[in-house]
Amino acid sequence: MKENKRKAVSPEQRKRDILDAAFAVFTERGFAATRIEDIAARAGIAKGTVYLHFADKEALFTGLVAGLASPVLAEIGALAIRDGLTGRQAVTLLYDTFERLVLSTDRRHLIRLIISEGPTFPAIAEIYHRDVVSIGLKALQQVLSRAAERGELRAPAVAEVPQIIASPLILSIVWGSLFGRLEPLDTKKLFAAFLDTLFLPPGDA
């Protein structure tokens, strides 16, 4: 009788499996209520196996943020260095990227987690700020500074507060979490209306 053997899993695949399990449990239970053993159970492995790859829950969260945010940050960074785009075109593409890679995927749950648990667990807010927000803001600063130099902004001072670009993105996440079931938000109309408040019509720039 042949002995059943488990299929060997590479360290890289095991790490991905752990991160997938962590994401599922974090979004279901929140950061505070999640235990390493919960993540191990979801991944179908022993608790000690998780510790072979991640020192603690915060290290797991850091790895999760890096993996989920990388595609989004890569596209934002590419937009920042495309000189041929107007500011409005660049921000429009940013909103399209957010719609495609965040709002339409499970990545939106990560932002909800930050909003809901960041005040109680400042460490996770700090991780997200360091690995995502600060990088994105630098790219947006480039886009808005260039738009200000070209006279594309209704208020040039906007270039000094790139965080303003994120306001409709955060609104879409919060609204969807609280009221989406009752009154869905048309994010495309929201983003288009917000762009009109930021940028002058093409002929006026």
Image (tube, helix red, strand yellow):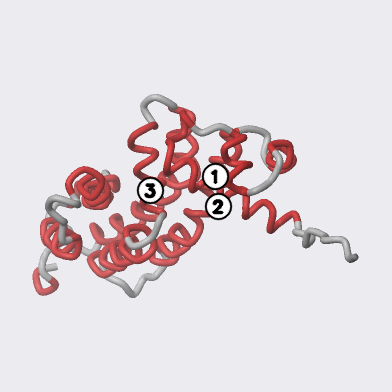
In the rendered image, which quarter contains the C terminus? bottom left
Left or right: where does residue 4 sit relative to residue 55?
right
Residue behind mark 1: 22
Category of crowding for the residue at label 2, using alpha-carbon neighbours closer than 10 angstroms: few (below 14), some (14–19), many (at least 20): some
In the image shown, does 20 or 56 lie closer to the viewer?
20
Residue behind mark 3: 109
Left or right: where does residue 115 sit relative to residue 18?
left
Residue at 28% x, 62% y is 95
Residue at 33% x, 62% y is 104
Category of crowding for the residue at label 3, using alpha-carbon neighbours closer than 10 angstroms: few (below 14), some (14–19), many (at least 20): some
Q: Quadrant of residue 30?
A: top left
Residue 27 percent coordinates (x, y): 43, 43
The vertical placement of 83 against 41, above or below, is below
Distance between mark 2 and mark 1 Cα atoms: 5 Å
Left or right: where does residue 48 sit relative to residue 36?
right
The amino acid pointed to by label 1 is Ala
Residue behind mark 2: 20
Left or right: where does residue 17 sit relative to residue 142?
right
Category of crowding for the residue at label 1, using alpha-carbon neighbours closer than 10 angstroms: few (below 14), some (14–19), many (at least 20): many
Per the image, label 3 sits on a secondary structure element best described as: helix
Residue 118 percent coordinates (x, y): 39, 31
Residue at 39% x, 40% y is 113
Mark 3 or mark 2: whose residue is earlier in sequence: 2
Distance between mark 3 and mark 2 Cα atoms: 13 Å
In the image shown, does 180 or 145 lie closer to the viewer?
180
